[in-house]
Image: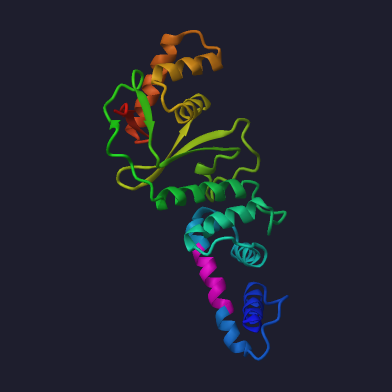
Amino acid sequence: MKAFQEIQHSFAAHMRNPEVNPPPPGMEDRRLAIYRELILNNMDGFLSQGFPVLHSLLSPARWQRLVRAFLQLHRSDTPYFLEVPEQFVRFLSAGQGSEDDDPPFMLELAHYEWMELVLDASQETRPVQGVDPEGDLLDGVPCLSPLQALLCYHYPVHRICEAFQPTQPLDNPVWLVVYRNRDDQVGFMEINQVTARLLQLIDANGEDNGRALVARLGEELNFADTAQLEQFAAETLQHLRDNQILLGCCCPST
């Protein structure tokens, strides 16, 4: 068993980095080349499908080096293919495989694309009980969809494409909500910092009604005109419900 495990480790190391790690003795290079190409091409295809925008912005040679570096340097702690994109983001976060000419937004763009995949593949379901979809969002307790994520970036990742590649971060971070609607389509909404804070308060205070949350928001903003703030909040909450980021109001348990 020990000898077999040593062969496995040697084979895997060679597949990840054939230029550094020799194959197990007695294996024909012609056969090994088939596996080397298969593993690299599979990982290339998987990552290019998971990160299509990032893939489109890097040159083919740079993308190949990045995929090879991921195979060579990153020690994955999961065997599941669906979790490979998260491992790739961790790899980028650690600065592994980076080059001086990489776009400064590369990590944030990859994280944003990964979050779209997370929402698309999520097994979470919207509750069918305990929610009033038509409830008053100020008098009632706003209910967040489990299929949404509040994100903050220093680059406008939702706008980045071949024709728009910013070289400097924004003066103020951009807030995005990524969500999946009832038709299982993933979308995003750009929001301001006040709306982002309101969503954070909803998430952190699951028993407070909308008016209480707005009052707390007003205290934080030092905004004395409660009526004006409530009008803003009512319109904002309705917009979030229209986009299925809010499901409605949570019904009290009996």
Q: Position of residue 150 (x, y in %)?
A: 49, 37
Count of marks, rendered view = 0
Q: Which residues are magenta?
A: 36-46
Dividing the picture into quadrants, the one containing residue 133 is top left
Residue 210, percent from left and from top: 39, 20
Q: Residue furthest top?
A: 224
Q: Residue at x 66, y 67 (%)?
A: 72
The structure's colour scheme is rainbow
List x then y, in percent, for residue 242. Answer: 32, 32
Give how far across and how far down residue 181 sits, in percent: 34, 42
* Residue closest to the eye, 252 or 24: 252
Asked if residue 25 is among those painted magenta in the image, a careful observer would answer no
- Can residue 56 be spotted in the picture? no
Front position in the image: 81 or 204? 204
Quarter of the rendering occupied by the N terminus: bottom right
Residue at position x 52%, y 61% in the image: 47
Q: Is residue 41 magenta?
A: yes
- Relative vertical location of residue 69 with respect to residue 206 in this rendering, above or below: below
**Residue located 63% across and 56% down the image:** 91
Query: Within the image, what quadrant is residue 132 found in?
Result: top left
Q: Nearer the viewer, residue 181 or 130?
A: 130
In this picture, residue 171 sits left or right of residue 219: right
The image shows residue 123, relative to residue 8, as above or below, that is above
Q: Main secondary structure of the magenta part?
A: helix
Is residue 85 among what the camera can see?
yes
Front-most of 99 and 86?
Answer: 86
Quadrant where the C terminus sits is top left
Q: Is residue 9 left or right of residue 111?
A: right
